[in-house]
Image: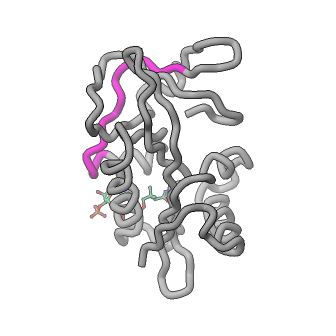
Amino acid sequence: MIQVAHTADVDPATLRAARALLERVFEGDFADSDWEHSLGGMHALAWEGDELVGHASLIQRRLLHRGRALRAGYVEGVGVRADRQRRGHGAAMMDALERIIRSAYDLGALGASDDGARLYEARGWTRWPGPTSAITPEGVIRTAEEDGCIYVLTGAAELDLGGELTCDWRDGDVW
Ligand SMILES: CC(C)(COP(=O)(O)OP(=O)(O)OC[C@H]1O[C@@H](n2cnc3c(N)ncnc32)[C@H](O)[C@@H]1OP(=O)(O)O)[C@@H](O)C(=O)NCCC(=O)NCCS
């Protein structure tokens, strides 16, 4: 069962369980800022009975591209409990979030891990082939280490895939 709810409507115990799940799934490589990036938008929570087995969220960001500040539905905090992977939970959570992206945003975007890339590619997301950068307090700075890891779900926005994609600023990992 997939529960879709805004952060404001997810009870605090479930949010704690989701964060603990992500910390386990990412084997300690999940910082406070990574959790913070997952808040303030819509969560897709995968349940098996009363057990939480997966989490993904969608937040709004601005992505600068060809002189426009696109309204992006940005996917964060995607993880399925290790013993419940490859059973369709990741796909079911993405179904729910992609519906929201298609109806409410100019495009979808995310920064992918290797596992994640396989899931998103299987679902028709496009790896951004052009250069990436971020708007920082010091100005626009290239994020070359992220090139090749950013995926987009194209919607109504006209995109020049060879062009530059620039994300807005935040603490922690910018993409
Ligand atoms: C990425 C992740 C969320 C996928 O969740 P999942 O529930 O296992 O995914 P699904 O079972 O819905 O997979 C759907 C399809 O995606 C593709 N896919 C997903 N994981 C894959 C993998 N590890 N290897 C190859 N293909 C994969 C397959 O096409 C799969 O369909 P199939 O099982 O019929 O072949 C999960 O592997 C995970 O939590 N990984 C660790 C954390 C992480 O990297 N999260 C992503 C951050 S961007």
- Would you place residue 30 above or below residue 20 in this image? above
Residue 104: x and y in percent read: 37, 48
Residue 33 visible in this rendered orientation of the protein: yes
The residue at the point 30 percent across, 36 percent down is 126
- Report the front residue among 8 and 22: 8
Question: Residue drawn 41% across and 63% down?
Answer: 93
Q: Residue at x 56, y 82 (%)?
A: 51
Q: Is residue 128 magenta?
A: yes
Where is residue 2? Give x, y as percent: 43, 73
Q: Is residue 105 above or below residue 12?
A: above
Q: Position of residue 127 (x, y in %)?
A: 34, 33
Q: Nearer the viewer, residue 24 or 46?
A: 46
Q: Quadrant location of ligand 1? A: bottom left
User: The N terminus lies in which quarter of the figure?
Assistant: bottom left
Residue found 36% across the figure and 72% down from its top: 87
Relative placement, left or right, of 50 versus 23 is left
In percent of width and height, residue 3 lies at 47, 73
Residue range corresponding to the magenta coloring: 121-133
Residue 134, quarter of the rendered image: top right
Position above or below: 63 against 23: above
Q: How many marks?
A: 0
| Residue sticking out furthest to the bottom | 49
Tell whether 50 sits left or right of 89. right
Up-down: is 106 above or below 17?
above
In the picture, the quarter occupied by the C terminus is top right
Residue 169 falls within the magenta-colored stretch: no
